[in-house]
Image: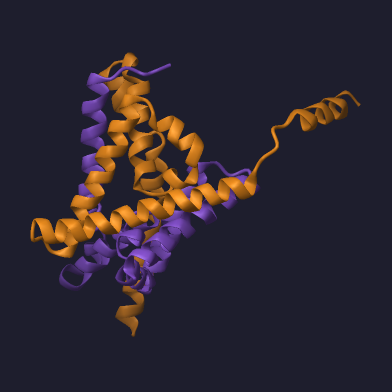
Chain colours: A orange, B purple
Amino acid sequence: MKNKKYEAIVEKHKPEEKRVQHAGIAFLTGGILGLCGELLLEGYTHLFDLSRSEATVYMLVTFIFLASLFTALGFFDKMVSFARCGLLIPITGFAHSMTSAAIEYRKEGPVYGVGSNLFKLAGTVILYGVVSAWFFGMIRYLLEMGG
Amino acid sequence: MIYILSFLFCGTVCLIAQVILDNTKLTPGHITSIFVVVGAFLDTFGIYDMFIKYCGGGALLPITSFGHSLIHGALSKTPSTGFIGLLMGMFDLTASGITAAIVFSFVFSLFFKPKN
């Protein structure tokens, strides 16, 4: 009985989620980032006379650097709470999770703070990426051996 | 044309993630993990390469391309070294991104304090 009352009160005070608006903002920010990525890629290939795969590395490092810098300066969190998945799903989210973990735990020391917490959030991405890539790679390899 | 496609592709990936985030109990951590696995799966039969060919930077930015790069590096080593190439080539293409993220976050953690 008490629980039900409590749940009713919680339901009443829940902030009304603007799902459509969130989705639109995420779409726009993600799209703009993708567009910037393509522009940078083209720019690097022409400016420094790089091959497309080398320019890809430069482009990704640029984004990682900017995301880390903005996180360190402290206003990337506000941008994330505004754009949500628009900033978390591109590679900027990966860099953001690592830098914020590093800065948050720095007061606990360089080894047990920064060292052991750096991959706290990014670790899942690497773990499941590597395991799934190995698994799918095995399937592809065996198929090529058999066929 | 490639600019429009990269806008649409990257935007759509983020849109799907945002819809999942808003309508389920999954956290951003779950979603990025799922997307990496999806990216690795799509590259198993070369589908993600097509996205990269037509969408360019828009397909390289989302975290799905991380899974794609992992398996792409692994598979590119198998013709010369066989089965063990899967282990040798795994980080070939993603090494730059991971190293950059580690170095930058360490350096910035030396100079900046948490804001709150």
Is there any visible trace of residue A43 in the rendered image?
Answer: yes
- Residue at 34% across / 34% down in the picture? A98
Front in this rendered view, residue A146 or B22: B22
Image position, residue B51 (x, y; %) = 36, 69
- x and y percentages locating residue A13 in the rendered image: 75, 28
Q: Position of residue B70 (x, y in %)?
A: 30, 57
Left or right placement of residue B97 versus residue B68 in this view? left
- In the rendering, at what x and y percent does residue B8 appear? 44, 62
Residue A1 located left or right of residue A24:
right
Quarter of the figure with residue B48: bottom left
Point out the image quarter for the N terminus of chain A. top right
Q: Nearer the viewer, residue A145 or A54?
A: A54
Q: Residue at x 15, y 61 (%)?
A: A45
Q: At 24% from the left edge and 26% from the top edge, which residue is drawn?
A: B108
Farthest residue to the left: give it. A49
A112 is higher (above) or lower (below) than A22: above
Q: How many marks?
A: 0
A70 to A60, vertically: above or below: above
Examine the rendering and report whether any part of residue B24 can be seen.
no
